[in-house]
Image (tube, grey):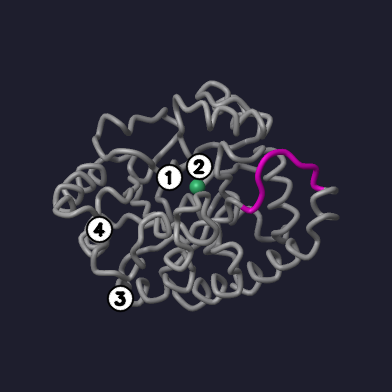
Amino acid sequence: MKIIDAHMHDYQNSPYFDQIARDAGHENSEEHLRQVYRQLGIVGGVVMGNGGLSLQEHCYPDFLHYCIGLDSSCFADGRLPDCADLVEAHLQRQNCVGIKLYPGYSYYYVFDKVYDPFYRLAQKYQKPVAIHTGDTSMETAILKYAHPLTLDEAAVRWPKVQFVMCHFGNPWLTDAAEVVAKNPNVAADLSGWAVGRFSLGDFADQYSGYLQQLRTWTGYVGDYSQLMFGTDWPLVNLSDYIDLIRYLIPERAQEQVFFENANRIWALGL
Ligand SMILES: [Zn+2]
């Protein structure tokens, strides 16, 4: 089965993420990633962009597409128009397939008018907006801004924009399921539910209730056409994570979740 990794990161030159990759049984390098992707049948990935907005900072190998990510510095006084121009320059590139927002890390709700210039661009270029939802990795983040229910209002205000709810709002799974089920312009990726290395058997024993919740609420959405596999590389072992998502998603929906939905929603042409 062909697989697309619809949510991953590219953290070059970072001793911190080098160690996280090693803890997951990987090496934080392009060659290693290319090799593991090939071994596992992963034919492409979508980088959730971090860092600056200059075009030079976003050069990726041929097997990766990317979303241009807005960090909190864009929302500092007076910077927004410059950021919007730079984001537009990215969206004009073929390998830039969307925009990534980081509410929680940024202290704005996703329906705040501060994001309007970016939603307007997403609509103009017909490229999705991925939104961090759920748990955050920094103590300075504020969780209320990352709650999946906040996407409902953005989705209603911008019906022609395709949204991607990252991490399925974990752990607010009931709210996430309802927002995806209700809004035809909201999809979700299934990344970030586990980190490091694990064996599926032990993980399923230890976290049986959690996995049951994940299965129940992804199933609640209905037809699985809005759900996409993603890994959050380099945080988790890719092979272990594929095993986990295979375990949670019914076999009849796996082609869609592992490949077809991401290829369609991110317009990857794979
Ligand atoms: Zn991520």
Residue depicted at x 59% and y 43%: 3
Residue 48 disc label: 1
Q: Earlier in the sequence, mark 1 or mark 4?
A: 1
Looking at numbered disc 2 in the image, what kind of residue is underneath it? Met
How far apart marks 4 and 2 lie (CA) works out to 21 Å
Q: Earlier in the sequence, mark 4 or mark 2?
A: 2
Instruction: Decide: few, some or many residues near mark 2? Use Cα within 10 Å; few <14, some 14-19, many ≥20.
Output: many
Q: Quadrant of residue 268?
A: top left
Q: Is residue 238 left or right of residue 118?
A: right
For the residue labelled by badge 1, is the local secondary structure a helix, a strand or a loop? strand
Q: Are marks 1 and 2 in contact (CB under 8 Å)?
A: yes
Q: Are marks 3 and 4 in contact (CB under 8 Å)?
A: no
Q: Is residue 164 left or right of residue 158?
A: right
Looking at numbered disc 1 in the image, what kind of residue is underneath it? Met
Residue at mark 1: C-beta within 8 A of ligand 1? yes
Please provide the residue range marked out in magenta: 193-200
The relative height of residue 42 versus residue 188 in the rendered view (above or below) is above
The residue wearing badge 3 is: 157
